[in-house]
Amino acid sequence: MTASYSTASTLLVAIDISKYRHEILIGIPGKKRRRKLTVTNALEDFQRLVGILASYDLPVRIGFEATGNYHRTLAHHLGQAGFELKLVSSVSLARTREALHNSWDKNDPKDAQVILHMLEIGAVQFFHDPLVTGTADIQELSKTHEIVSHSKTELWHRILTHYLPLYFPEAERFHRSSRTDWFLAFLDRYPLPHMISAMSREDFIKDAWQVVGRKVGKEQMLSDIYATAVASVGLPVHPESDAIHMFRLVLAEGRSLIRQRDEIEARAVELLSDLPDYQLLTTIPGIGPINAMTILAEAGDLRRFQHHRQFLKFCGLDLATMQSGTFRGQSKISKYGNARLRRTLWMAGQTAVLKRTNSFRDKFERYISKDRHNAHLRRKAYTAISAKMARTVHAVVKHGEPYRPFFEAGVPRRKDLSL
């Protein structure tokens, strides 16, 4: 949040964003009366608003609350007109509204008044337009990848909890990774175990040889599948029934989602492989192409954070303590920050501690050394590793040096990227 600054000669504009129209309150320097406007989400109204603001012939500072994606188009047009844009925190807006009005009541004109007040006292944040900063494509790749991955996870749970228990309960044990397409292709070819047992073992192995892809010990695995199918308790449904047709529709959707995910990941590597920040991030254990893309998409240029504590706060990994009088609560992470970034760093930390010879694993082992089987202690250790991952991510980009697992004695602490 920026510090307070003078607004004596600046036109302050507060906008309450909504889907179809925006309530606008203009604070004119030297005048107590504020001008109210209503602007619809249309190009003609955007141009009218730009003309009105430009007619005052004063520096213009505009504040608004991020509301879904509805603020993006208006903010882009105002930014292109040369106006200064500020973002208002949703949490700060709610707390300030309660303090000013002593009420939980909420409406659009009231929100505009509160936003204008926050502009006056400087309780605002920077707004970075992804289209202007060049991160729009990366953000869309990252968000679409998350949508596709989430859809695939939901679909896989439906297969595990509905379709397989009905038709081929024993088949689940042959599935090893959600990143492979062969298992869904196999189920699409043989959705029912009696379709397998109707053939001889040799004929089945020959028929399924190409379906399961390139696997070590393929013949042994196919023999195991055949024996499992012979003894299966799956329902004897007809292969041409509507029930099996629905099963195959779901399998086709799953295979389509895998292809979409692979396409996005390939495009991400192609788009980012020459980017220096991407190359630095992928030197860190636990950070692969998708995690690096998510960090760049959500954080933008990490050099804009002067200190790693600012980045920790942006992620919601900063420590917060509830204190009142003689009572002092336990310090814990605030979680008031970017949830996708925090989740990415958590997952990267979990991967890093599984690898050998790096400072993340070393810290994790020291953290849980008192009681390795204590679930609460392990959870706290993973949280500490997530914060360490955030500090490392910020350090390698800020200093422009790749990650090294451990540093020799004598290296200045200022450049200690393994913190």
Image (cartoon, helix red, strand yellow):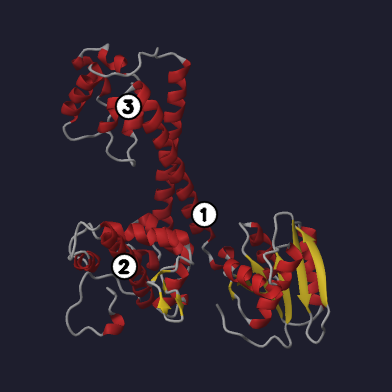
Separation (CA) of disc 3 from disc 2: 42 Å
Task: Determine the secondary structure under disc 3.
Answer: helix
Whether pointer 2 and pointer 1 mark residues with C-beta atoms closer than 8 Å, the reply is: no
Can you identify the residue that label 1 sits on? 140
Labels 3, 2: front one:
2
Image quadrant containing the N terminus: bottom right
Counting labels gives: 3
Residue 179 location, x and y as percent? Answer: 34, 42
Residue 403 location, x and y as percent? Answer: 28, 70
Residue 206 location, x and y as percent? Answer: 23, 20
**Could you say which disc has been placed on residue 173 in the image?**
none
Observer-nearest residue: 266 or 130?
130
Q: Earlier in the sequence, mark 3 or mark 1?
A: 1
Residue 11 seen in the figure:
yes
Q: Residues within 10 Å of mark 3 (few under 14, many from 20)?
A: some
Task: Determine the secondary structure under disc 2.
Answer: helix
Location of residue 63 by image quarter: bottom right
Can you identify the residue that label 2 sits on? 384
Residue 285 seen in the figure:
no
Q: Earlier in the sequence, mark 2 or mark 1?
A: 1
Residue type at numbered disc 3: Phe
Residue type at numbered disc 2: Ala
Give the residue at x 32% y 19%.
234
Labels 2, 1: front one:
2
Q: Earlier in the sequence, mark 3 or mark 2?
A: 3
Observer-nearest residue: 292 or 94?
94
Can you identify the residue that label 3 sits on? 186
Q: Residues within 10 Å of mark 1 (few under 14, many from 20)?
A: few
